[in-house]
Image (cartoon, helix red, strand yellow):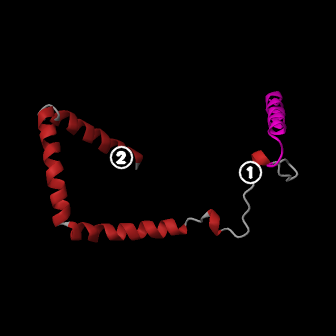
């Protein structure tokens, strides 16, 4: 499967390389400017057809995203911030700032010592 994709990519690049000799930059700019006016018109006139093709894709995406569990769906979930708790589960949120800095420096020193 990977070799097939590689071959398709190489063939596509070769075709683009060959055709790029016949297509100039001003022509590409002309096509881009024309598409600015044509695309909104086509979207407006063919909106029902486009919506008809996109609705099944949108429904599949909605189903897939609904299968992904959310954090809020977990019962009795408690947010535990490792920076604010020690190993015994004590919460240091209310301690003075100097104590937090001292504890943080100690943990950095321990990390440097460990290989």
The quadrant in which the C terminus is found is top right
Q: In this view, does 64 lie above or below 7?
A: below
Q: Residues within 10 Å of mark 2 (few under 14, many from 20)?
A: few
The question of residue 98 being in magenta is answered with yes
Q: On residue 81, which mark appears?
A: 1
Q: Pick whichever, 3 or 29, lies toward us.
A: 29
Residue of label 2 = 5
Which quadrant holds residue 104? top right
Which quadrant holds residue 7? top left
Q: Residue at coordinates 83% horizontally, 52% vertically from top-left?
A: 91
Spot occupied by residue 34 in the image (x, y as percentages of width and height): 13, 47
Q: Residue at coordinates 14% horizontally, 31% vertically from top-left?
A: 21
Determine whether label 1 and label 2 are within 8 Å by CB: no
Q: Pick whichever, 64 or 88, lies toward us.
A: 88
Spot occupied by residue 112 in the image (x, y as percentages of width and height): 79, 28
- Residue at disc 2, secondary structure: helix
* Front label number (1 vs 2): 1
Query: Secondary structure of the magenta portion, mostly?
Result: helix
Which region of the structure is painted magenta? Answer: 93-115
**N-term-proximal mark, 1 vs 2:** 2
Spot occupied by residue 24 in the image (x, y as percentages of width and height): 13, 33
Q: Pick whichever, 81 or 56, lies toward us.
A: 81
Report the Cα–Cα distance between label 1 and label 2.
45 Å
Q: In this view, does 101 lie above or below 71?
A: above
Asked if residue 24 can be seen in this view, the reply is no
Q: Residue at coordinates 80% horizontally, 35% vertically from top-left?
A: 101
């Amino acid at each position: 499967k990977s070799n097939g994709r590689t071959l398709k990519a190489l063939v596509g690049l070769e075709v683009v390389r060959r055709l790029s000799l016949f297509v100039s930059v001003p022509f590409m700019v002309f096509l881009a400017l024309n598409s600015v006016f044509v695309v909104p018109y086509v979207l407006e006139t063919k909106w029902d057809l486009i919506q008809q093709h996109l609705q099944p894709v949108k429904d599949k995406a909605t189903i897939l995203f609904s299968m992904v569990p959310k954090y809020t769906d977990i019962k009795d979930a408690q947010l535990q911030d490792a920076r604010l708790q020690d190993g015994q589960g004590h919460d240091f949120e209310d301690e003075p700032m100097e104590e937090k800095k001292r504890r943080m420096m100690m943990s950095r020193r321990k990390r440097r010592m460990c290989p």
